[in-house]
Image: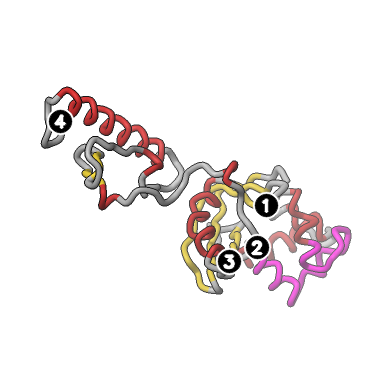
Amino acid sequence: QGLTLKNVHLTRWIDGRKQGGEFGEAEFTAKGLAGASVLRLSRRIVDAMAAGRKVDLTLDLKPALDPAKLEARLQRELGARPGGTCGQLLRSLLPAPLDAVFCGRLGLSPSAPAAQVQGSKRKQLLGLLKELRFEVTGHGSWEEAIVTAGGVSLKDIDPRTMASRKVENLYFAGEVLDLDANTGGYNLQIAFSTGWLAGASAARKALGTFPDGPP
């Protein structure tokens, strides 16, 4: 909890199949994973879970290194501390809060000799560094959401004015529309732009300055 990782890569898996990924930040909280990368992946995760599908995330802690380069790095670290411990080895590769997590996954004590990270243990460590897996068991509540999906169909809206195609003198804007985007300011821009257009269009219609078309 409280650990934020930068420049990592998250991959989304749905029913065992890779379904997109995001590079950026990931944050560990009391409830689970958070951060911009998680938010960008969350829309399809929520939909998949609602459909009863199995969802996993894998975290690549060393996306800049392919497996061969990562193994070479691990060998250098092992060679640099022949009398070191597993904890010391892991601290050369990971943020300190992850030491105990990785030692637990490897079945080794932090005080165990680093030389024990050989053979299958070394292969397991390399796998954890490139694909630390998390099973998604839930998601945040409505109170935690930052944008909603779904709403009034865009087919029923005149995009020139935001007016309803079904009900006269009715205008729509923002998240009431079936329109949403990735996190990063895009949803705010949608709200600002559609709100301005809907308001201007409604005012001009009320004034009779463009009864049959946009401003």
In the shown orientation, is residue 169 left or right of residue 59? left
Q: What type is the residue that disc 3 sits on?
A: Val
Q: What type is the residue that disc 2 sits on?
A: Phe
- Give the CA distance from mark 4 to mark 2: 51 Å
Q: What type is the residue that disc 4 sits on?
A: Pro
| Circles 3 and 4 in contact, beta carbons < 8 Å | no
Q: Which residue is mark 3?
A: 55
- Give the CA distance from mark 1 to mark 3: 14 Å
Identity of the residue furthest to the top in this view: 207
Tell me the number on the disc at residue 215. 4
Position of 37 relative to 17 (above/below) = above
Kindly report which numbered mark, 2 or 3, lies closer to the viewer in this rendering: 3
Q: Which residue is mark 1?
A: 32
Kindly report which numbered mark, 1 or 4, lies closer to the viewer in this rendering: 4
| Circles 1 and 2 in contact, beta carbons < 8 Å | yes
- Give the CA distance from mark 2 to mark 3: 9 Å
Query: Residue at (81%, 60%) from the top-left corner?
Result: 86
Q: Which residue is mark 2?
A: 134
- Give the CA distance from mark 3 to mark 4: 47 Å
